[in-house]
Amino acid sequence: MENIDVVKKSMEKTMEKLNQTVSFLQKKIKITPEIAITLGSGLGAFAKKIQIEVSIPFSEIPNFFAPTVIGHSGLLIVGLIEGRRVLALQGRTHFYEGHSMDEVVFPTRVLGLLGVKTLILTNSAGGCGDGMQAGDLMIIEDHLNLTGTNPLIGPNLNELGPRFPDMTEAYDKELRAKLESIFKTNGVRYQKGIYGGLSGPTYETPAEVRYLKMIGCSAVGMSTVSECIVANHMGMKVSGISCITNLAAGIASHKLSHNDVTETATKVEAAFTKALMDFVAVI
C-alpha cells in the first residue's frame, strides 16, 4: 500500500508540474500554434527566420532545464513562418546530461497540453547507411529505441494518453511524403532511413556501428526517440529530420568530435532553413 501511495503521489506531482508550466506559458502566448519544432544541435539558426512574437529562455520557464550542450540556445520562441504560427524549442534536454527521462520529455508533453497538433523533431546524427555523406538531410521513416529505457515506463498518465500507444506510424506517412517533395523541389541532397536512438554521451565504437547498420540503422544519435514516443502517446503527428553531420565511427576516416556536428550544421544551414520553412507552409 505504501508503494502504491508513493507512485500515486509521483504521478500527481508530474501532472502538477505540467499544469504549472502550461499555465505559465498560456499567460505569455496569446495564440497557441498547432505546429511546433524542436531544433537539434547546431540547427537553432532556423529561429532567425521566425517573426518573433514571444521569446522565453528555458531558465525562466517553470520546470524546464537550460541545455548544457553547445549548439542548444535554450529558448522557447513563438512567431510566424510563411504566414503560419509556430512554436520553436531552440535546443533540448538530453538523457546523457543526467536528467531523468521524465525531465527529458517534459517539454514535449507541455507542447501537447498547449494544443500542438504537429511536432517536427530535428537532430544532428552520424550517418551509417550506404551512400550517406556529411551534409545530407535524412527523412526519418522510423526509429529503433536503443536507449535502454522508455519514457512511458511506470504508471500511465491517463490524462496524456493510453497505456499502450500504437507506434505503427511513429513518423507520419503524409508528412514524410510532403517533406520528400519539398526536398526534391529545392534540390536538397537527402536520404530516407531509420534513426537509431542511443543514450550517449560517447560516440559509438566501430563495432557498435557495424552492429547498428546490420540491424537496420541508417543514422545514429542521442535524442528524438523519447520525444517521438510521448508525442505519439498524446496523439500528435510527428515528422523527423536528421542532419547527417558526420559519418559514424569506423566509417569516418578521423576521430569524431562535437565540432564536426556544429561545423557541418552551419554549412547546411541555408538549405535546411529553406526546406523547413517550405515544409511548415504546407502542413
Image (cartoon, rainbow, N blue to C red):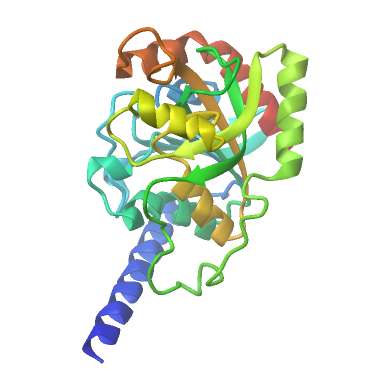
Name the quadrant of the C terminus: top right
Quadrant in the rendering for residue 132: top right
Query: From this viewpoint, is residue 36 visible?
Result: yes
Quadrant in the rendering for residue 24: bottom left
Q: How many marks?
A: 0
Is 195 situated above or below 160? above
Please give the name of the residue rendered at 45% of the width and 16% of the height, measured from the top-left corner.
247
Query: From this viewpoint, is residue 52 visible?
Result: no
Please give the name of the residue rendered at 38% of the width and 31% of the height, measured from the top-left corner.
208
Front residue of 270 and 209: 209
- In the picture as drawn, the residue positioned furthest to the bottom comes out as 1
Name the quadrant of the N terminus: bottom left
Q: Residue 238: where, in percent of width, then height?
A: 61, 45
Please give the name of the residue rendered at 69% of the width and 45% of the height, measured from the top-left corner.
172
Q: Residue 156: where, in percent of width, then height?
A: 45, 73
Is 25 situated above or below 262? below
Please give the name of the residue rendered at 33% of the width and 64% of the height, measured from the top-left corner.
17
Front residue of 54 and 165: 165
Is 249 situated above or below 26? above
Q: Is residue 238 left or right of residue 205?
A: right
Q: Residue 151: where, in percent of width, then height?
A: 41, 58
